[in-house]
Amino acid sequence: MPSIPPELCTRCKGYKRLCGLPTCPILDKFRWQVSTMANFRGRRVEGLTPPSALVGEAGYPQVRVYYMIPAARSEEEAAYHESPQEWARRREPLSAIIRLRSMMLAAGMRVPAKDPWLLYETEVSLAAVSTRPVDSEALLKKQPIPRLVFNGVTKPVGPTAPARKIIVEGSPSIPRALEKAISDDLRALDAVWELHRQGIDVYTIQRALSLGLIGSQKRRKIVPTRWAITAVDDMVSQHLRRELRDRRESGEVRIYYREYLGNKFLVITMPGPGRFEWFEAWHPAGVWTMEARSPIYWKVYEDPRGRQTSSDGGFSAARMAVLEELAKRGEKADVVIVREILPSYYAPVGNWHIRETVKQAMGSGPIAVNPTLKEVMELLKEKTGGSASYVKTHSLLLGLRRRARSLAEFFSL
């Protein structure tokens, strides 16, 4: 939540919206917690997992696995609590996504990371990768704690409670390709790629890797969800890069754009061997810039072999979406991605929206083809504001001149 001066809150009292946000985060959080706790009373909770599960990092190698059960009455309603692709398609607002996540009970249990078979035998991990919601029951040790936990990579986690036992009452429906991957003895890199190649959605693959369902049989382990998300993005990207290595270079400069949840994304693809540049601009008074007085910038550079100047989960998610589109076109390209984060992004809901928004940008077609360099900078300024001057100054790809030919000829100069 952004750092809002308390003097402003006392004058506003949640209804004047003096902070400029579309809704009061303080009142919303209170409403979500109160309404959610009304749905979870007692120490026995029954419902449908969407499917959904999260593995925490604290205490590793003894990890806490959270099995999610929403206050939902139907399969369709339950499934929507874990539907990032559908949220993006419908352009659900930030408040709606937080509300959906706050309405799920997270029943937690400690499990040794090196023993994923404990979850497999009880079908907890299978229920978490099912193609449809699964009837479940959680017997709790304590009453749920009414809270919302936010993370920059994973989706928010609602009320939590330690579980004495989790019972999977329904029958999980596992995709045939995933069933085969579970029984096979493939290394994780190959299993992830094979599942992606066969059309298993990335979020199911993330949960499968996190819960220790795929990988070499003797080396499988439960992995914190935050690690698994970036690992899957990187593994898929690694294979896509190999596929594109010997393909022709793009013959055009294309610019794509999309905005969602107070995040703006501008993607520039241009002739080149497959280098990437990632720029982030965080505005003051945002979720991670409470005390900042001017925008904070972050940059990642990656060469054609995938070697980075630094790692970043948001970049991994965006890069995979771009590489998927390039693979469809059968061409490699140099890519500049600019992300601008506005103060209206007042609560982090995970990096799924980066992946989905960039995918939508690429899928909706370019907003400009073969613009002049001047037009590129004008579009940058129009779509991302003050980031344009920073990108112009710090971008190697937009300013780099090659020995054989320069970018100028592709920018119609």
Image (tube, rainbow, N blue to C red):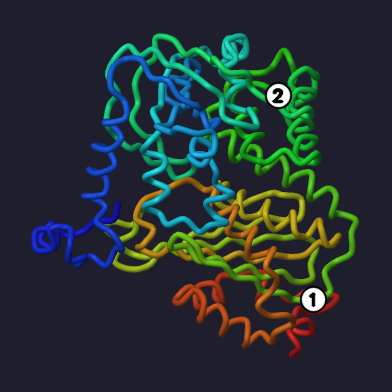
Instruction: Say left or right for 400 vs 404.
Output: left
- Local packing at callout 2 (Cα closer than 10 Å; few below 14, some 14-19, many 20+) is many
Q: Residue at x 64, y 71 (%)?
A: 256
**In this orientation, which residue lies closer to the viewer: 405 or 2?**
2
Categorize mark 1 by other alpha carbons within 10 Å: few (<14), some (14-19), many (20+): some
Foreground: 239 or 83? Answer: 83
Q: Nearer the viewer, residue 239 or 176?
A: 176
- Report the residue at 22% width, 43% height from top: 30
> In the figure, 311 relative to 283: above or below?
above
Residue 66 image point, x, y percent: 45, 24
Residue, disc 2: 214
Q: Amino acid at mark 1?
A: Glu
Question: Which residue type does callout 2 highlight?
Answer: Ile
In the structure shown, which secondary structural element does the residue marked by tag 1 occupy? loop
Which of discs 2 and 1 lies nearer the camera? The answer is 2
Looking at this view, is 299 or 372 the one in front? 372
Q: Which residue is mark 1?
A: 252
List x then y, in percent, for residue 371.
Answer: 70, 84
Specify which label sits upstream in the sequence, 2 or 1.
Answer: 2
For residue 140, what is the image quadrant? top left
In terms of secondary structure, where does tag 2 sit?
loop
Measure the C-alpha gap from mark 2 to mark 1: 39 Å
